[in-house]
Amino acid sequence: ELKVEQNPLFLSMQEGKNYTIYCNYSTTSDRLYWYRQDPGKSLESLFVLLSNGAVKQEGRLMASLDTKARLSTLHITAAVHDLSATYFCAVDLFYNTDKLIFGTGTRLQVFP
Amino acid sequence: DVKVTQSSRYLVKRTGEKVFLECVQDMDHENMFWYRQDPGLGLRLIYFSYDVKMKEKGDIPEGYSVSREKKERFSLILESASTNQTSMYLCASSFSAGNNEKLFFGSGTQLSVL
């Protein structure tokens, strides 16, 4: 059974600080997704990582994938309040099916 | 932009009622999915469909069924609603499997079963 674990589950950080969210998964997969969810809203796609060593960056967020370690990271640089949201990673259960298994989510709160 | 529309934002039903949750996408996507989201559990896949009239069970199909009579519409059915089905339900779609496509999500239906 594929398990996708995120940590931390909750993250409270000060504006301007850096931090990393970790996503571990338990079986082989080379497709990993990161989504963002604002309170009361639906999920918005952030990154699609398709191969070992893939790195993608947008603004203050950078995601990477290490398929050998079965680990993806979402790094936050110089956090701002607008990044406050819940972040989910998701892994393709079977190769090329779009059937995603989601992690439990990391709730990020950025304060002044 | 791709639009995935869920018919109700909030829904309150009584135990034992039959409940229909509707989802429509407007981009001719082949794949459609139903997830439920619960605090501390993330999103869990209930059912998905790769084509009209096709359906496959996800991780937690018990107590649910689905219908896909048209490509753009995917319905989730709770045959006899129970309180443990109180949850946020999210519909999603993607173009086709194998093209590394991200999922597009609807805004969700918060279902309360009393």
Image (cartoon, coloured by chain):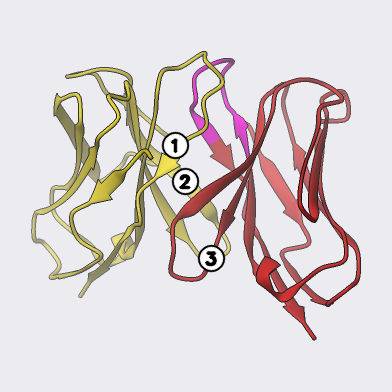
Chain colours: A red, B yellow
Q: Real-space Cα distance between discs 2 and 1? A: 7 Å
Residue A56 colored magenta? Answer: no
Segment tinted magenta in the rendering = A90-100
> What kind of residue is marked 3?
Asp
Q: Can you identify the residue that label 1 sits on?
A: B59
Residue A95 colored magenta? Answer: yes
Residue B111 on image: x %, y %: 26, 65
**Residue drawn at (69%, 66%) of the image:** A83
Q: Which quarter of the image is occupied by the C terminus of chain A?
A: bottom right
Q: Can you identify the residue that label 3 sits on?
A: A38
Res. B44 mark: 2
Q: Which quarter of the image is occupied by the N terminus of chain A?
A: top right
Compared with B47, A17 (above or below) is below
Residue B13 falls in image quadrant: bottom left
> What kind of residue is marked 1?
Asp
Residue B59 falls in image quadrant: top left
Q: Are marks 3 and 1 in contact (CB under 8 Å)?
A: no
Viewer-side label of 2, 1: 2
Secondary structure under tag 1 reads loop
**Residue drawn at (24%, 51%) of the image:** B6
Q: Is residue A1 visible?
A: no
Q: Real-space Cα distance between discs 3 and 1? A: 25 Å
Q: Tell me: A42 left or right of A88.
A: left
Residue B4 on image: x %, y %: 31, 43
